[in-house]
Amino acid sequence: MPFTALGLHPALVRAVKALGYTEPSPVQAGAVPPALAGRDVLATAPTGTGKTAGFLLPILHHLLAGPRGGVRALVLSPTRELAEQIEAVARDLARFTELRATLVVGGKSIGPQEKALRAGPDLVVATPGRLLDLMRQGAARLDRVAALVLDEADRMLDMGFLPDVKRIVSKLTAREQTFLFSATLPPVIAGLADDLLRTPATVQIGRRTAAAVGITQAAYPVPAHLKTALLRHLLRATEMPSVLVFTRTKHEAKKLAKVVAADGFAVGELHSNRSPAQRTKAMDGFRRGAFQVLVATNIAARGLDVDHVTHVVSTDVPDVPEDYVHRVGRTGRAGATGDAFVLVSPAEEPSLGRIERQLGQRLPRVTLPDFDYHQQPAGRTAITERKRPGAPKKLRPPAAQPPRPPRPRRR
């Protein structure tokens, strides 16, 4: 079915064609027609399946048909990076119209965002915290918002944004249509959908329990203290044009990025300790290919759209199987192929087992013949030796004391 058959405004069809798309993806084909008819939509689909256009196209269509002036559509997103992508897609789709979209996110100067809101854009893409700040200041008037989108709703729940979302929704007195898009549908999100949506059209594309077709997965057993050494070996010995490396914490990401950069690789960092400008630079550089390696926390696991990622390497085994699948989903996008490696220590095997049960397959274990699995980390002894229980402590020799000055003699 071509986009022309969906009944979209000609300007939107023209924009879609200019972007190089001729047929809607399954989630778009399922969500756009009922949304154009005015129905609420509940869609569950993996990231990378075209969900963003699935809600933006019908919203822009309705905005073109309605009166101008004031914010009439609101998209809430859990992270700044995802919000920036949504706003960019909105601009691309509205390129042949006069509709204006505004980005409202934390970590950037609030003044320009306040000014943009007071100018009355048609569509606002926002993270919940910053939008609430502007609402408290009276800069964000949402009394004309007719369409609301909750994108990556399960991620918003994970990040603790649900109370903020409910506070925002309570102010949308003119809301007529609601879209809830999510990769998974846990009970809390299902309950939120029951509260917000009215007889919604339900769209379910696949299940977020397996990686996409075309992704080759493997597990690399390795002692915990040799994970960095193994990653460096893989980067040097394997052709990896574009690598996304995941770490558990922002501190690990920072340290690992320095080590990989010291090996001569162009490296970007993406985690919460980076400034907005640094995060934007990292993502833009990775998209352009200026950075061969992007070291990131789970902030990059969902929604971030980079088509050319050839390899995903997890330096830890996620505790939640869905997090692993989201990470893996950063490669093999849009029908491409990709490789996903996870470095697993003996203590992480139970977590990997839970992931394998959800995937319905056992990941092949790979041991490299040219890597020394018995080496010690550079510049330090092994963790097991350094923290061996019961090891006697070495006594330091007493420091040499300076001679005492002679006592004065009494007269």
Image: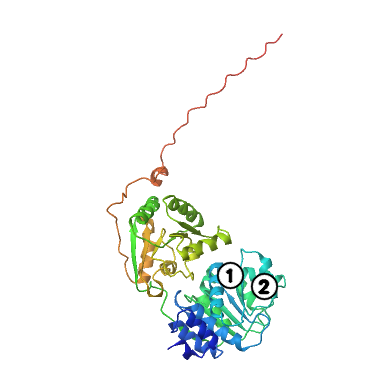
Q: Which residue is mark 2?
A: 116
Residue lying at the far left in this picture: please name it.
369
The image quadrant that residue 122 belongs to is bottom right
Q: Is residue 231 above or below residue 308?
A: above
Q: Which mark is residue 14?
A: none
Regarding mark 1 in the picture, which secondary structure is present there? loop
Foreground mark, 1 or 2, reads 2
| Count of labels in the image | 2
Colouring scheme, one of rainbow, by chain, secondary structure, one colour: rainbow
| Residue at 35% over, 56% down | 234
| Residue at 51% over, 57% down | 250
Camera-side residue of 258 and 286: 286
Q: Quadrant of the C terminus?
A: top right
| Residue at 34% over, 60% down | 239
- Which kind of residue does numbered mark 2 sit on? Ala
The image quadrant that residue 280 belongs to is bottom right
Q: Which residue is mark 1?
A: 161
Residue 379: x %, y % from top left: 41, 42
Residue 65: x %, y % from top left: 61, 89
